[in-house]
Amino acid sequence: MWTDSHCHLPYEGLEDPAAAVAAARAAGVTRMVDVGTDAAQSAAALEVAASHDGVWATVGLHPHDAVQGVDTIMSLLDRPKVVAVGECGLDYHYEHSPRAVQQEVFAAQVRLALERDLALVIHTREAWDDTWSILRTEGVPPRTVFHCFTGGAEEARVCLDLGGYLSFSGIVTFRRADDVREAARLCPLDRLLVETDAPYLAPEPLRGRTNTPANVALVGAEVARIKTLPVESVAEATWGNAERALRLRQ
């Protein structure tokens, strides 16, 4: 059995969450974490979680949407089946929100995770140093997940030293992602998660198509190959890690 630790339902290409959940279960993916990126998407994720056993939600403000302000998501944090704050963080690739605003909003969400004893789900792109600086300043929540990990060995070591979990997506299967595969190789089995980030980043051989939670097994199989482990060992480890990191309880 597999846990998709990070997906987006409903979203473009996955407008029918019930169908996506059913397809995932048929593929052995029996637990999913539906991740919020702003108030509207967080509310939608909560609706999906409320409607399906084995689905949980997060509430967060993505760095792209940081200009909306943390106040827009506060009323959702106390809803049932919320397991994390996020995804939140820094994205200096697109900078849809100014960097200073991103930093302020990320720091505020780190504090929320600490205050409410929730996990923290981090999105970081081309912003490692500032991400680590804010975490060190605010304090690292005990259950911090670096989602869709895209760094190499050096970044992985820092994230692990901070106590984080590394969550690998379909990128780990991409031909040119040798640095990500090296990070997966060195990541201890007890700090490893797998995700789809559906509807994005479909793994090989499905790259270019709409991704779904059902495909997380392909990510897990590639991680198993990289680490020269049985697929069952990766499935079992990531199942337990997701339960601990995100407190996945009905």
Image (tube, rainbow, N blue to C red):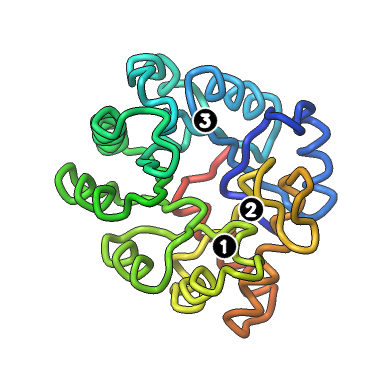
Residues 92 and 222: in front is: 92
- Work out whether 64 lies above or below 173: above
Q: Residue furthest bottom?
A: 228
Give the residue displayed 50% in from the left and 30% down from the top.
Answer: 37
* Quadrant housing the C terminus: top right
Indicate the position of residue 203 as horizontal and vertical percent values: 71, 59
* Separation of marks 3 and 2 at Cα, in angstroms: 17 Å
Give the residue displayed 28% in from the left and 38% down from the top.
Answer: 110
CA neighbours of label 3 inside 10 A, class few (<14), some (14 to 19), many (20+): many
Sequence-wise first label, 2 or 1: 2
Identify which amino acid the numbered label 2 is placed on: Thr
| SS at badge 2 | strand
Identify which amino acid the numbered label 3 is placed on: Gly
Q: Is residue 204 left or right of residue 100?
A: right
Please tell me whether mark 3 or mark 2 is closer to you in this view. Answer: 3
In contact (CB < 8 Å): disc 2 and disc 1: yes
**What residue would you read off at disc 3?**
36
In contact (CB < 8 Å): disc 1 and disc 3: no
In contact (CB < 8 Å): disc 3 and disc 2: no
**What residue would you read off at disc 2?**
3
Q: Quadrant of residue 191?
A: bottom left
Give the residue displayed 68% in from the left and 80% down from the top.
Answer: 230
Please tell me whether mark 1 or mark 3 is closer to you in this view. Answer: 3
**What residue would you read off at disc 1?**
238
Q: Quadrant of residue 20?
A: top right
Residues 192 and 40: in front is: 40
Residues 8 and 155: in front is: 155
Indicate the position of residue 36 as horizontal and vertical percent values: 52, 30
Sequence-wise first label, 3 or 2: 2
CA neighbours of label 2 inside 10 A, class few (<14), some (14 to 19), many (20+): many
